Image: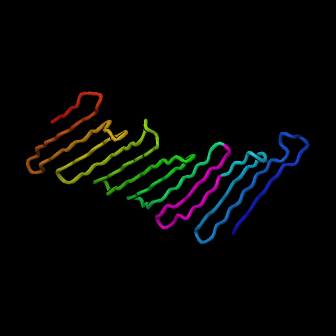
Amino acid sequence: NGREIDAKITSVCQVIDGKRLNLKYNYVDSTFTGELKYIHDATHAYALQVIDTSGNDRVNNVIKYISPSMNAEFTTTGEYTPTEANLRTICIQNGKEYRFGLNWIIRGRGSAYISVEMYTPHEMARDGKFLFKYDMNPGKYEGQTMLTFNEGVILDFNGVVNHDLETDNVDARFRFYNPYTRNGEIR
């Protein structure tokens, strides 16, 4: 089921003469392919290409951008459900690779784990990660929020609350770490 639309301008006005816009798309056996191309002149063409084979809780797609000054390719793969996801995106731009990740696991109101990661080829910003997790069980609550950058911890806030349900006693501990301020702990 492929389609193609091609539009070309012919004009005595040199500014717009010869411009062309082309759209192609195809959908066969749960695979979508598409391309949008703009041709400005013989040396300036721009294109956006998409290939998507996602389905059945699976993400798998490639998006390419092509221009005279930059080429970029984004590949996203992974699995997802409403309660769990593991998604990875790789971006290759002018020969440099950037990687991004997203993970989450959610178990009702009782526990959650969410992390977002990035890796780049740049020395000033090689990697970073944001982590948020909590776990609630009868009598015990734990949680953490952490941010890392260039393999170093920038922020770590975590805590544990123990609640003895029989005596109604509560024991709580919270810790805060930041390399730029004084660390703290509350008991």
Residue furthest out toward the left: 167
Q: Quadrant of residue 157?
A: top left
Q: Residue at x 37, y 39 (%)?
A: 150
Q: Where does the magenta region start and end?
A: 48-68
Residue furthest out toward the bottom: 29
Up-down relation of residue 182 to residue 108 (above or below) = above
Q: Position of residue 107 (x, y in %)?
A: 32, 57
Q: Position of residue 65 (x, y in %)?
A: 62, 50
Q: Position of residue 4 (x, y in %)?
A: 74, 61
Residue furthest out toward the top: 181
Q: Position of residue 69 (x, y in %)?
A: 65, 42
Left or right: where 151 falls relative to 20: left
Q: Residue at x 72, y 64 (%)?
A: 3
Residue furthest out toward the right: 12
Pick the residue in front: 1 or 96: 96
Callout count:
0
> Residue 161 in magenta?
no
Left or right: where 184 falls relative to 4: left
Left or right: where 19 falls relative to 186: right
Question: Quadrant where the N terminus lies?
Answer: bottom right
Left or right: where 22 falls relative to 53: right
Up-down relation of residue 89 to residue 56 (above or below) = above
Q: Residue at x 25, y 51 (%)?
A: 135
Magenta segment's dominant SS is strand
